Image (tube, rainbow, N blue to C red):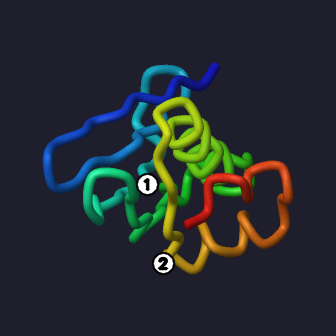
Amino acid sequence: MTEIKQNNSEKNGSFEIYSDGEKAGEMTYTWAGDDKFIIDHTEVNEAFSGKGLAKQLVYAGAEYARNNGKKVIPLCSYAKSVFDKNEDIRDVLS
């Protein structure tokens, strides 16, 4: 079972994903004003690769943006590729 936790501060934050209680990876972001955040890094530990966890992190970021009236700038190459391949989350792009 996976669980995603968000950590947020005035300047930056992260989404961490846990698999069976063990931290499996994270996606970090930096705020760009009050209404946008920049996804700058997505990483999943090698032991958990190939399970779609990084994609779940990007989707969690998109859901957070949608639910809170924010926009996303995906500078991380992985996050950008997920947005490019999945039209259903592009509504939150800046």
Which residue does the image show at 57% across and 80% down from the upper left?
A: 77
Return the x and y of residue 48 as percentages of the image width and height: 60, 48
Q: Which residue is mark 1?
A: 27
Return the x and y of residue 8 as percentages of the image width and height: 24, 39
Q: Amino acid at mark 1?
A: Met
Looking at the image, is 83 positioned above or below residue 34? below
Q: Which residue is mark 2?
A: 75
Return the x and y of residue 28 as percentages of the image width and height: 35, 57
Looking at the image, is 62 positioned above or below residue 73? above
Identify the secondary structure beneath mark 1.
strand
Dot 2, crowdedness within 10 Å: few (<14), some or many (≥20)?
few
Query: Which residue occupies the foreground of this view, 18 or 71?
Result: 71
Left or right: 20, with 89 as reference point: left
Left or right: 82, with 1 as reference point: right
Image quarter of residue 9:
top left
Return the x and y of residue 22 as percentages of the image width and height: 42, 30
